[in-house]
Image (cartoon, rainbow, N blue to C red):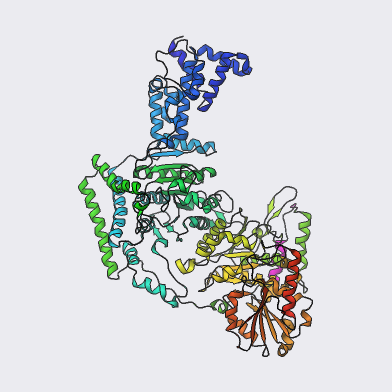
Amino acid sequence: MTMQKTNDKFIEALNSFYGPNAGYALELYERYQQDPSSVDPATRAFFDNWQTVAPDQTPAYSPAPVTNQAQTMASSASTNPLLVTHVAAATALAHAIRERGHLGAHLDPLGTPPMGDPALQPEYYGITDADLAQLPASIVGGHAAEGAANAYEAIQRVREMYSGTISYQFDQVKGPAERAWLRDAVGLALFEQPIQPEGARALLRRLTEVEAFERFLHTTFTGQKRFSIEGTDALVPMLDEIVEEAANTGTHEVLIGMAHRGRLNVLAHVLGKPYSAIISEFMHGKHNSETAVDSTYGGWTGDVKYHLGAEQVLDNGDKTDLKIKLSPNPSHLEFVNPVVQGMTRAAQENREQPGKPVQDFDCAIPVLIHGDAAFPGEGIVAETMNLWRLRGYTVGGTIHIIANNQIGFTTEPQDGRSTYFASDLAKGFEIPIIHVNADDPEICLQAVRLAKAYRDRFHKDIMVDLIGYRRWGHNEGDEPAFTQPQLYEEIRKHPTVREIYSKRLADLGIIGQQEADNILKEVMSDLEEAKRKADGGDVEGATEEVESETEGDYQRGDVPQSVSVQRLTEFNQALLEWPRGFSPNSKLARLLQRRATTLGPEGGIDWGQAEALAFASILADGTAVRLTGQDAERGTFSHRHAVLHDQNTGQIYTPLQHLPQAKASFAIYNSPISEAAVMGFEYGYSVYAEDALVLWEAQFGDFANVAQVIIDQFIASGRAKWRQKSGLVLLLPHGYEGQGPEHSSARPERYLALSAGQNWRVANCSTSGQYFHLLRKQAFELRHDPRPLVIFTPKSLLRNPNAGTTLQELAEGQFQAVIDDPLAQGRKGDIRRVVLATGKIAIDLLSHESRKQADDVAVVKVEMLYPFPAGELTQILANYPNMQELIWVQEEPRNMGYWRYISPRLRELVETNVELRVIARPEQSSPATGFLDRYQMEQEQIITSALSSTIKEYGGTHVR
């Protein structure tokens, strides 16, 4: 047998081991050589055959000195193992480059050397380039070996693929089909498009527009903040490419979320916001100045230009037009991420049919642009990424782009994150990562083409780490040389990406320098013309006028049509019918079947049943319902049971998805242990799906504290800042039951402090009937005047008979903002003290044993807290002409709860001779005591003080 044939057979045998497995095979082979009995019989038989095909001569060249693991390989070197060593080393090198090539890639436009890794060099394995040149390319494997003359040439191809100005991290992807697709995409250069004059000219023009726009603003509005994109200019053509690919694949919408850096450029060039409109905002145009201070605009405040959103619809020829939407967001950076995800989910779902909503992943695509410091630093990022394949939150994949300028304000990466790459967090979610050098715009486009195709193929998230720099300080009035003098000296000398690309095109003879200069002149001319228009007040896309609003509009609105007794009875019956053979837990079945007995005159409809009937009536009216929360399907307090589980098979059944009368979809999902991301998601969903009743339920009301940014910056103020309309309902369990400071208070004081300008509604219902009517009113208002609704829902009242209702009340009643005391109606002239309370404490007062003896006391329930029901309260208080004391009673400490919000409003309603007081727990830093006996004592003192003939000093406070 010739030497060549022997080698070929040997290589064929070794090729059955790929990558690191070849090293394992080598280790076994060394053990076999020393002692054939040390390996198992099957392996021994394989190596016996291996010996027969291994070459019997040592190659003419000698291996380079070896170290580390290569030393072990060489230690048993003899005639046969030498080739085995080189083959194993070559395969290990190829695998290392594929796995860790990003550590040697040229990704920093400023030329910082890559981190590197010894495993990326042949010397690490005890071989040289000359050794590789004498091995066949097939050892390297993959597409790099196809057509290569030898292993050295194949290794060089692998380096070009994984260690150039683009590199990849795919090993965290567990699906073999995905990994194979990604390897093919890289190895076959499936998304690399040869440079053509037309495309090159378009790309140069776009880069010129990006740079010229920033240069124009920099020189025209010196020192004004704009959070320039310069240094990551390629982001704009990357977004262009995603939009174009989306249009080509029939996508209906692209929804973008990003913080402020580069936002103005994206607004101008991706969303098509006219230059004149942006320039006018810099000039503080007349309209914007007026709306910022004129109180007749009903709470409309506007926002700074780099927080605003926009929307553009592109004509897509014969296909459906493509809508591009940039969501507005505050400076809380990454908190827009779940909002965009929720908007995308709403855009993907058809809610017009009964049952579950029908979702189409491909009709809408989310694109999230992150900051390199914020991506690993903000916990909301991890919360949001965790949603990607959860059934209630998946959107079929998000394209993530890190606009990586390698610094956070003044903080360098080593002080801002514990990972080498800003993108490393994504690895934990099995998200493939593409790193690109922002100074190579063609490679950047290649990256997003791959990302879009991967998302479409596998409906998973994918990440592009766009590594650039920041030409100016954090904002344009900041001096970065104070903290990074050497870095900014390097940036000062570094050419812009437009300059680099135009020179490259000139060198290739595609576009001459004169043509490039002419393009720049044309763009600058367009900007000057836009400035002249703005100076003259000729501004395209001017802000529309905002209608005036005043508090109290909510109470004057129309009410939803009532639901008949017969209709409610039909709903109730349908909800208690299950498929043949379906067997829920026997105890639960008995509890649910009790709902069939509560429709008589004696009542007994509790919270869970009233809610189910409300949802059923809303669905029958044609309004979709979506409810989520950490335990929403069952309900934290085991009161809802909207999703049933067969005790024998585990099959689930959701009665509201099989309601015969339904005309719209019903969705309910348990959420992950997250508040900020899921609340942001539901807010985004509600903003997009204005036709759906969207509810988020906290496991306990104080859990919503974790989502305070979403509450403050989006739900409470989104209408005033961005005119975003949302009808999101927050269900926040609240009430003092003696279980300690945790989970007693939903912190109503926080929501009331944020209440202004008709921004939302805040309520605390005392009965299940009130809750029924409030949900129906909220669904009704979606078509007329959508506002968020915060409801402090009960815990112990869920099954309290005093908080139940009757079928007649559901059919004939309506939501009442204030409810008078029925026991006081026959003796209004005797009433000396009117007690006001809301929620659970109101029921405690009305049901207390001393209530009947308090002949001169009326207990009035305030159900709507904001907008403050001044008119209703005034009418009720007028019924008590001899009132001497008006007392607000609450369970919460005086410095919490409702008192500080409500006291000045009550003072305006009564004469100065009426004493205004509060009865509450003393001021505290903690919401409640952790001792049950102390709680019971405090609660009893509050109630007896409120109902006694004279107020005891416990908790009592006068307000003159």
Can I make out residue 804 in this image?
A: no
Q: State which region is magenta.
A: 566-583
Q: Position of residue 49 (x, y in %)?
A: 55, 14
Quadrant location of residue 701?
Answer: bottom right
Q: Is residue 530 above or below residue 816?
A: above
**With respect to residue 71, does 642 lie above or below?**
below
> Residue 611's x, y, as percent?
67, 66
Q: Nearer the viewer, residue 36 or 343?
A: 36
Q: Quadrant of the C terminus?
A: bottom right
Q: Count all numbered tags in the image, as a single digit.
A: 0
Q: What's the residue at 51%, 39% (across, down)?
A: 178
Q: Does the stretch in magenta take in 573?
A: yes
Q: Give how far across and how far down residue 342 sits, in percent.
A: 52, 57
Is 17 part of what is drawn in magenta? no
Q: Is residue 257 left or right of residue 896?
A: left
Camera sees residue 676: yes
The residue positioned 42% from the left and 28% from the top of the image is 121
Residue 857 relative to residue 119: left or right: right
Find the residue positioned furthest to the top.
1
Image spot of residue 252 (x, y percent)? 45, 55
Q: Tell me: residue 123, above or below residue 281.
A: above
Find the residue positioned furthest to the left.
514
Q: Please tell me which residue lies in front, 652 or 570.
A: 652
Nearer the observer, 852 or 254: 852
Q: Quadrant of residue 824?
A: bottom right
Q: Is residue 786 left or right of residue 306?
A: right
Q: Residue at x 59, y 68 (%)?
A: 790
Horizontally, is 742 left or right of 421 in the view?
Answer: right
